[in-house]
């Protein structure tokens, strides 16, 4: 039983390792973005004393005449149509609810759902009115910052490496074994508690570590980045991915590959 | 300590995984996450260390002072522990919320170090029945809420003795730690099976 001990190492600032030419314009709440009043105010800004001031900490984005500040780390703000993965923490205690739902959903269960409406106080109402949503069975949950989940057409991905992933917009990412056949009549509420094979488990654990590495290095999470990271991690043992130097190496390779693919 | 709610299916997945010696993060049941250790961080102590494991961050300082041996053990020095769970570690530690956990950990530490294989208390004796060294150990938990505090704290004591010039206890590296010592047994007992 070997225990690895290490001394602390000073962290390298991310921009050095990225080699970005254009520096992001970073602001904190209260910073002046511009004194030019010709711009329209977007999210994260407000007008005060003839200047545009930032109200959140993040990077300034400018689209023609619209200036907004995109927060780097933020609580999840629901938008209609978002896919979310959530855990049931509390439920209504009424008689009809008891009769109808107790058998299917309990406190602590994970579900995938879509945002139906957003209230003015920020609360969202969810629906699972499609067979692809519903209670989640066996798998692993990874929690990351919501700002790292890229908005895409679909958030349900069956990855070629042998597992599937649901990228919730709220930062909850669910990694699970790909179901062998789609059970349409089950409707997703009856969990399959059969043991998952060791090969599938290893894929899931590796994916989970890759997602954690990408999130630690502040990379955007989407199917391609996760897949490239998985492939970059294959030469290493699954448990080694969590080591800081290996994590950096893998994410560097992923970043390189993504840049090549773009340009 | 913070508890995580899990669905039945997640629990089943974890348990089956443990039966096959594979935790959710790919480690085997006996594998540790990597530990980061820094010594000599607090200047006004005889020795100090900071240990990071996973999400947990602990700071320990030891001050050696002269005192009188206890009546029932006139040839030995002794240790006094004080554990402070800072409110920044977990929301429930706000105010006096962390006191219960702190007392529990301190009691566990007393039991661990009340044993010849962890520390030779006779080496702390200066002159029997009159003078001895008293080691005041202060522990500060300032991040994280995982299960294995006592294990990590006993590891820290070993690290710290190397920085503490006044102690005559031999330094033991954690890799060579005796399998049967109470610290090790405690860590095995406490190690939670759901790797996170």
Image: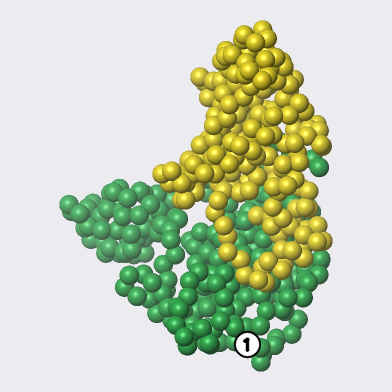
Chain colours: A green, B yellow
Quarter of the view holding residue B127: top right
Disc 1 chain ID: A
Q: Residue at x 79, y 40 (%)?
A: A2
Q: Position of residue A231 (x, y in %)?
A: 73, 60
Relative placement, left or right, of A154 versus A3 is left
Indicate whether B103 appears above or below A167: above
Towards the viewer: A104 or A207? A104
Relative placement, left or right, of B58 versus B29 is left
Camera sees residue A95: yes
Indicate whether B170 appears above or below A132: above
Q: Neighbour class for label 1 at 10 Å: few (<14), some, many (≥20)?
A: some
Give the number of callouts.
Answer: 1
Q: Quadrant of the N terminus of chain A?
A: top right
Q: Residue at x 65, y 71 (%)?
A: B8
Q: Position of residue A125 (x, y in %)?
A: 42, 78
Q: Residue at x 66, y 29 (%)?
A: B157
Q: Position of residue B152 (x, y in %)?
A: 66, 38
Q: Position of residue B2 (x, y in %)?
A: 54, 54
In what element is the residue under mark 1?
loop
Residue under label 1, please give it: A187
Camera sees residue B155: no
Q: Quadrant of the C terminus of chain A?
A: bottom right
Towards the viewer: A254 or A101? A101
Towards the viewer: B87 or A85? B87
Q: Residue at x 41, y 44 (%)?
A: B95
């Amino acid at each position: 039983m070997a225990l690895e001990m290490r001394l602390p190492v000073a962290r390298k600032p991310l921009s050095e390792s990225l080699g970005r030419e254009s520096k992001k314009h970073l602001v904190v709440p209260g910073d002046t973005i511009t004194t030019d009043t010709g711009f329209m105010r977007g999210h994260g800004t407000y007008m005060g004393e003839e200047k545009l001031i930032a109200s959140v900490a993040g990077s300034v984005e400018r689209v023609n005449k619209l200036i907004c500040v995109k927060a780097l780390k933020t609580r999840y703000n629901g938008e209609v149509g978002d896919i979310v993965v959530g855990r049931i923490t509390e439920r209504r205690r009424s008689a009809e609810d008891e009769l109808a739902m107790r058998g299917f959903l309990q406190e602590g269960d994970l579900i995938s759902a879509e945002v139906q409406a957003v209230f003015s106080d920020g609360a969202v109402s969810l629906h699972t009115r499609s067979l692809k949503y519903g209670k989640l069975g066996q798998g692993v949950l990874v929690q990351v910052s919501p700002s790292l989940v890229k908005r895409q057409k679909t958030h349900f991905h069956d990855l070629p490496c042998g597992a599937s992933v649901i990228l919730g917009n709220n930062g909850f990412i669910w990694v699970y074994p790909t179901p062998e056949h789609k059970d349409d009549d089950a409707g997703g509420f009856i969990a399959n508690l059969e043991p998952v094979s060791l090969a599938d488990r290893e894929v899931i654990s590796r994916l989970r570590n890759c997602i954690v590495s990408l999130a630690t290095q502040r990379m955007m999470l989407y199917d391609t980045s996760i897949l490239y990271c998985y492939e970059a991690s294959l030469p290493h043992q699954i448990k080694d991915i969590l080591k800081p130097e290996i994590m950096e190496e893998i994410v560097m390779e992923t970043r390189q590959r993504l840049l090549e693919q773009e340009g | 300590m913070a508890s995580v709610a899990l669905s039945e299916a997640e629990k089943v997945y974890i348990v089956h995984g443990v039966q096959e010696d594979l935790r959710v993060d790919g480690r085997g049941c006996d594998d540790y996450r990597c530990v980061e250790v820094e010594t000599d961080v607090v200047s006004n102590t005889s020795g100090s260390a900071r240990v990071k494991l996973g999400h947990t961050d602990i700071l320990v300082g030891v001050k050696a002072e002269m005192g009188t041996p206890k009546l029932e053990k006139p040839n030995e020095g002794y240790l006094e522990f004080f554990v402070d769970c800072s409110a920044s570690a977990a929301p429930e530690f706000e105010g006096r919320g962390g006191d219960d956990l702190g007392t529990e950990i301190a009691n566990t530490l007393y039991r661990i170090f009340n044993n010849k294989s962890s520390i030779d208390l006779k080496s702390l004796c200066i002159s029997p029945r009159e003078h001895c060294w008293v080691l005041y150990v202060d522990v500060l938990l300032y991040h994280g809420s995982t299960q294995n505090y006592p294990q990590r704290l006993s590891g820290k004591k070993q690290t710290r003795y190397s920085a503490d010039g006044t102690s005559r206890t031999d330094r033991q590296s954690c890799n060579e730690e005796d399998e049967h010592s109470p610290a090790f047994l405690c860590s095995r007992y406490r190690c939670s099976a759901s790797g996170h």
